[in-house]
Amino acid sequence: METIRVEHDPTLPGLMTVTLNRPDKLNAISFAMHREILGLCRELQDDGDTRVVIFTGEGRAFSAGADLGRRQAEDGAAPARPPLPTSRSPLKERSIATIGNRSSAAIESVPQVTIGAVNGLAVGGAVVWLSCMDIRLAAASAWFSIPEVALDIPLTWNALPRLVRELGPARTKELVMACDRFSAEDALRWGFVNHVVPDADLMTRARALAKSLLDKDPISIAATKSTVNALANLMVPAEGAHADPDYLMLARLVRRERE
């Protein structure tokens, strides 16, 4: 694979580590990365040996979010607005606009327990992917941002139902509309991450948590995950964001008219 690295742990059978691997782009989520994540998640659906999957990022970032051909921000400043699509086919544009919805749903639906180990920054689509994971750990220096509204595009990828479940309506509205950067300690206080750990200990703590899960009865773990996910969807159904691609298409149309 070109954009992700997949490793099976030789000392912890049942553990897989998936590393987003575009460090020169701060692991920005390209179309190729979406497709590789989709392919991996399809394989995990039929994988009866892997029980826990850790997601992390190579280098200085978990991920700078969707790679839209724009400058990636390292200091928290808003990146430049993404270029408008050049396709003349609205259905093709709509299909492309759904790939984040599909990759996010794929991560959320794998039967294995997923652990997000957040190093460096996590921006936009990276926060969405993290919201699809079961348990999240953050390095003490990690920070988060959801800048889409500041870029004149709505937050899509079916993110809003997930963020409302994790953070509540008021906090979700503030973070998505104000686009303010927030720290690992903020994320812990608001319940978005389970633990904040020293930077050097991030993967050690993630692997220790994985080992604790691997030591448990696999059917009990699997049943707990599927039941909690079903209950969360009853609380805030994901189907409420069914028009995400159309909101994005509308935002692009309005921007075309303005420019």
Image (cartoon, rainbow, N blue to C red):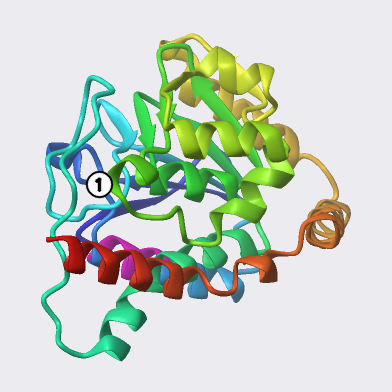
* Chain part drawn in magenta: 32-37
Position of residue 86 relative to residue 25, above or below, is: below
Pinpoint residue 234: horizontal percent, then vertical percent: 85, 62
> Residue shown at 50%/75% (left/top)?
42
96 vs 73: above or below: below
Rendering coords of residue 47 (x, y %): 59, 70
**For residue 187: magenta?**
no
Does residue 14 show up? Answer: no
From the image, tell me which residue sits under label 1.
Answer: 28
The part of the image, by quadrant, that contains residue 59 is top left
Q: How many marks?
A: 1
Query: Which corner quadrant holds the C terminus?
Result: bottom left
Q: In the figure, is residue 194 to the left or right of 159?
A: right
Q: Please give left or right for residue 36 compared with residue 2 in the image.
A: right
Q: Where is residue 190 in the image (x, y as percent from the top left)?
A: 67, 23
**Residue 160 or residue 192, whichever sits in front:** 160
The x, y position of residue 193, in whole percent, is 62, 28
Q: In the drawing, does residue 214 fall left or right of residue 31?
A: right
**Where is residue 141, by image quadrant?**
top left
Viewer can see residue 74: yes
* Prevailing secondary structure of the magenta residues: helix
Q: In this view, does 185 lie to the left or right of 211?
A: left
Local SS, label 1 = loop
Q: In which quarter of the image is the N terminus?
A: bottom left
Depth check: give the residue in front, 185 or 138. Answer: 185
Q: Identify residue type, mark 1.
A: Ala
Q: Which residue is drawn at 84% across and 53% down?
A: 228
**Residue drawn 27% across the image and 80% down it:** 93
**In this orientation, which residue lies closer to the viewer: 212 or 27?**
27
Crowd tier of the residue under label 1, counting other residues whose Cα lies within 10 Å: few below 14, some 14–19, many 20 or above: many
Residue drawn where x is 63% and y is 44% of the image? 163
